């Protein structure tokens, strides 16, 4: 799994509507908001980076969304997988 | 609060994200640690210089977060920057030094054996063929300390100026443009000008894909200020062009006519700032000086209608662009390889600078003429340390005796060691590289660091034999096209396995701390350089050969800032201790410890060089703007009268298409790292040919069909992508793909700019042929076997 901490920016006056839309995505959780600048603090949890990017692209198709930006990622599970794969490869 | 691991991870990330925009979150994080430690650093996947923290756990990197204090990215990250680190753990990492055996296969050896082998061979080549017979070819991805060390070993140890680096291929024309116009390299302003600008002119740059975090800043500025105008001049209607208020489509290589035409409109409509022009500029063709009337006469031949005929850019768009640029109050230009990778690259840079000087759009907030670099340390590592064949530290000419004397004295190099004659520039260097028995090839050995010339050089067929025949030593993390031709391969550490300084596009030097240990026997390049110096008898010159990479880095950095102490590039105030504590790095000039660094050069009150003892006496007391790099000591910048000239090779009956090359957002350079990140590889698994549907129809090409692209130099083949992003007649291919059949540099041209010696990657004349229907080439090709052949 990959997790991101992200900021989603809504069109002016559409922050509440956006919050409603986000409820349809179980991978996304809202942690805070900045009403003045129409921004939400969210986390995204996805199987991999590709799925995460695809989800963001889907969200951007909503007219309520201006932009989604990421500020941090946790990929420890993937690092462990890569190292495990490397060890198998070395044994081979 | 009792959290499970998953919730804890999410809450930690949310806390970080909230801090970036200065809000508190509903469920504050209490206790616990997502990682063992966060280590400060800089992203290495473009030239923006984004500040990051990497999270480590049990000597592994498990997380990354943007540095909210960074003045470059304010805590935000892009896909490439946030995922590229995963390549560190790929099973293909090189972990042992290797020497190629007589049977053609590599054999793992100890470091001692590898270094003895390399130093013995280099000594023999220098003895038999002269000091210049062994060359160094570095990279804008080496740290500053590494570039400085290799440069010092070659110029101050061997007495050879055969030192080059891949920035010659990406930004030499920008250097030439800055030095010829302003007398000194690198931009006057900073990224902070974005938020003050009223008009942003992006030319020869697909900023949205190549510098996404800077593009985000541009977009946000536009969103907050809808009256800010964005103009994009670019052959392809990229995502960058899509957000523009005005797109100036041009045929490759014809934008010189557009820039001249904009200058013509500015003068004709009396939008020029004559006070600024008279006080701060000199109009010249490089030999004589002229008045504004002569310049007006020169550009008057480029009416918008004439420019349209030359470039296919609509005349109305040129007129509107000139008006917005001149009348905005603060215009800011950005460009990258679209201007630099040209046979007229220096001229193209000069003509953009002309527009700024003509309208007084420089030396004030929001106004600047800014070349963005492609690599994380092309500016700091190669330009500033002078790691090119004609330069010395501080971007100063090797030809100058005064400079050589100062560098020798400050660097504790014996007087007279540095050769006054410049070495070979990159294209000449590779043309001169060959076997010991070939009398036409004076360079017999080479060591490359953090670069992949066997994929990245233009007109590649011409240079492969030289690399194969010579004694080639390659320092890299992975097997590449270049290791396939190498005699010795030395395993390198990643930036977070060694630490060091990167200097980004806006003159900002930022220190990355070592976070984790490298795998196996991989080593920092600075250790390899310093050990090579020791084995070749130069340990007094380069004593930082210890195993502690950060200690070695600090010693090299201190040596570097001592040598450049009194130059315009001074980082004397940016000691290692200060850089370690600085949350956002430091912008030069920084003349003494405690100085905060410089947002804008050439402006009294902003630029500390106005008070520096080496310069202040030359600057008139009443001068507010003064270009102190001016060789004529008049403090003026040059507005150049440059003729119009198109590309070296333009389409004709036999080769009817323009081919242009570039990057895509996911992949970095030759793909050796990014193609090893599974998500990136899946999203861009192979190179492709972008072709306009009208052209495709004419050749019977359907989406996915395999098409041969052929120039006078070579051919390669790609699946077709039918897109309307470029005008008919213009093809595009990205250059990250390592597969032999899709090496686009078999097709590109190696003609180069006479001034900057930078080749014209951006423009070649080609023909196309449909070979077959769709075939699956989404193979995510990487070179995993160190013993594989080049044609595999």
Image (cartoon, coloured by chain):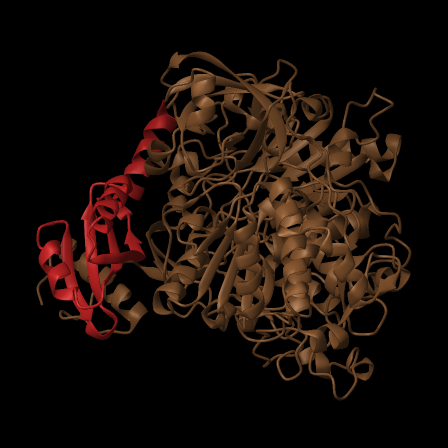
Chain colours: A red, B brown
For image coordinates 88% across by 57% down, the residue present is: B287
For image coordinates 88% across by 30% down, the residue present is: B128
Q: Is residue B700 above or below residue B683?
A: above
Among the 4 quarters of the image, the one containing residue A82? top left
**Is residue B561 found left or right of B203 in the rendered image?**
right
**Is residue A19 found left or right of B543 in the rendered image?**
left
Q: Nearer the viewer, residue B613 or B196?
A: B196
Q: Nearer the viewer, residue B55 or B213?
A: B213
At which x and y percent is residue B693? 41, 27
Among the 4 quarters of the image, the one containing residue B220? bottom left
Q: Is residue B243 above or below residue B510?
A: above
At which x and y percent is residue B381? 63, 54
Q: Is residue A84 visible in the rendered structure shown here?
A: yes
Q: Is residue B530 visible in the rendered structure shown here?
A: no
Q: Nearer the viewer, residue B163 or B648?
A: B648
Farthest residue to the top: give it.
B772
Q: Where's the N terminus of chain B, which quadrant? A: bottom left
At which x and y percent is residue B643? 77, 48
Q: Is residue B750 above or below residue B71?
A: above
**Is residue B753 found left or right of A49 in the rendered image?**
right
For image coordinates 70% across by 23% down, the residue present is: B462
At which x and y percent is residue B699? 47, 16
Q: Is residue B737 above or below residue B379?
A: above
């Amino acid at each position: 799994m990959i997790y991101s901490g992200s900021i989603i920016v809504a069109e002016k006056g559409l922050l509440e509507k956006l919050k409603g839309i986000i409820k349809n995505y179980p991978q996304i959780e809202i942690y805070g908001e900045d009403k003045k600048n129409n921004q939400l603090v969210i986390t995204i949890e996805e199987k991999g980076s590709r799925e995460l990017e695809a989800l963001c692209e889907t969200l951007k198709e909503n007219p309520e969304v201006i932009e989604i930006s990421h500020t941090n990622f946790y990929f420890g599970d993937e690092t462990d997988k890569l190292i495990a794969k490397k060890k198998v490869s070395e044994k081979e | 609060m009792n959290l499970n691991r998953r919730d804890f991870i999410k809450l930690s990330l949310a806390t970080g994200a909230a801090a970036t925009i200065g809000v508190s979150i509903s469920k504050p994080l209490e206790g616990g640690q997502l990682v063992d430690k966060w280590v400060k650093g800089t992203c290495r996947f473009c030239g923006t210089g984004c500040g990051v923290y990497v999270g480590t756990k049990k000597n592994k990197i498990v997380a990354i977060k943007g540095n909210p204090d960074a003045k470059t990215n304010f805590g935000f990250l892009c896909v490439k920057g946030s995922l590229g680190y995963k390549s560190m753990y790929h099973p293909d990492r090189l972990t042992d030094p290797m020497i190629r055996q007589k049977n053609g296969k590599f054999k793992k050896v100890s470091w001692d054996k590898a270094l003895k082998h390399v130093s013995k061979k280099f000594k023999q080549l220098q003895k038999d063929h002269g000091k210049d017979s062994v060359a160094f070819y570095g990279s804008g991805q080496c740290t500053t300390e590494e570039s400085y060390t290799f440069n010092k070993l070659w110029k101050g140890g061997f007495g050879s100026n055969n030192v080059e680096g891949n920035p010659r291929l990406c930004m030499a024309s920008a250097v030439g443009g800055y030095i010829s116009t302003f007398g000194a390299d690198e931009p006057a302003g900073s990224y902070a000008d974005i938020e003050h600008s009223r008009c942003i002119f992006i030319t020869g740059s697909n900023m949205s894909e190549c510098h996404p975090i800077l593009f985000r800043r541009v977009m946000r500025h536009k969103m907050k200020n809808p009256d800010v105008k964005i103009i994009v001049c670019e052959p392809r209607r990229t995502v960058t062009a899509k957000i523009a208020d005005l797109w100036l489509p041009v045929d490759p290589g014809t934008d010189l006519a557009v820039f001249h035409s904009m200058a013509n409109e500015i003068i004709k409509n009396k939008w020029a700032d004559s006070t600024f022009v008279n006080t701060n500029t000199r109009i010249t063709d490089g030999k004589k000086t002229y008045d504004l009337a002569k310049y007006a006469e020169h550009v008057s031949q480029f009416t918008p209608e004439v420019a349209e005929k030359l470039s296919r850019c609509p005349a109305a768009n040129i007129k509107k662009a000139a008006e917005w640029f001149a009348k905005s109050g603060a215009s800011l230009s950005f460009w990258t390889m679209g201007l630099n990778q040209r046979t007229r690259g220096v001229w193209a840079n000069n003509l953009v600078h002309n527009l700024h000087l003509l309208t007084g759009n420089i030396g004030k907030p929001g106004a600047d003429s800014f070349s963005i670099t492609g690599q994380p340390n092309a500016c700091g590592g190669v330009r500033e340390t002078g790691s090119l064949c004609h330069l010395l530290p501080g971007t100063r000419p090797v030809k100058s005796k005064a400079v050589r004397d100062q560098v020798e004295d400050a660097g504790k190099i014996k007087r007279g060691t540095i050769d006054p004659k410049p070495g070979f520039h990159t294209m000449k260097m590779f043309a001169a590289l060959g076997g010991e028995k070939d009398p036409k090839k004076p360079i017999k050995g080479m060591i490359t660091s953090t670069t992949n010339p066997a994929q990245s050089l233009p007109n590649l067929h011409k240079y492969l034999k030289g690399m194969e025949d010579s004694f080639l030593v390659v320092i890299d993390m992975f097997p590449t096209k270049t290791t396939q031709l190498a005699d010795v391969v030395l395993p390198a550490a990643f930036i977070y396995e060694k630490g060091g300084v990167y200097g980004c596009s806006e003159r900002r030097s930022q220190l990355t701390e070592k976070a984790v240990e490298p795998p196996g026997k991989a080593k920092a390049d600075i250790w390899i350089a310093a050990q090579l110096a020791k084995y070749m008898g130069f340990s007094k010159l380069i004593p930082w050969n210890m195993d502690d990479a950060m200690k070695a880095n600090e010693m090299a950095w201190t040596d570097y800032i001592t040598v450049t102490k009194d130059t315009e590039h001074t980082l004397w105030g940016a000691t290692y201790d200060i850089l370690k504590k600085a949350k956002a790095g430091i912008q030069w000039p920084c003349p003494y410890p405690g100085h905060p660094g410089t947002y804008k050069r050439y402006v009294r009150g902003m630029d500390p060089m106005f008070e520096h003892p080496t310069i202040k006496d030359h600057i008139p007391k009443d001068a507010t703007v003064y270009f102190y790099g001016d060789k004529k000591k008049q403090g003026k910048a040059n507005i150049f009268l440059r003729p119009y000239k198109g590309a070296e090779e333009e389409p004709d009956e036999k080769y009817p298409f323009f081919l242009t090359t570039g990057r895509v957002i996911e992949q970095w350079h030759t793909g050796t790292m990014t193609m090893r990140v599974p998500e990136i590889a899946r999203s861009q698994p192979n190179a492709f040919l972008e072709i306009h549907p009208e052209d495709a129809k004419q050749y019977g090409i359907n989406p996915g069909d395999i098409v041969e692209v052929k120039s006078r130099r070579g051919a390669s083949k790609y699946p077709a992508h039918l897109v309307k992003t470029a005008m008919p007649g213009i093809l595009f291919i990205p250059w990250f793909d390592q597969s032999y059949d899709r090496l686009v540099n078999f097709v590109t041209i190696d003609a180069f700019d006479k001034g900057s010696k930078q080749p014209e990657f951006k423009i070649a004349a080609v023909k196309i042929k449909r070979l077959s229907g769709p075939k699956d080439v989404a193979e995510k090709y990487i070179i995993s076997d160190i013993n594989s052949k080049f044609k595999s």
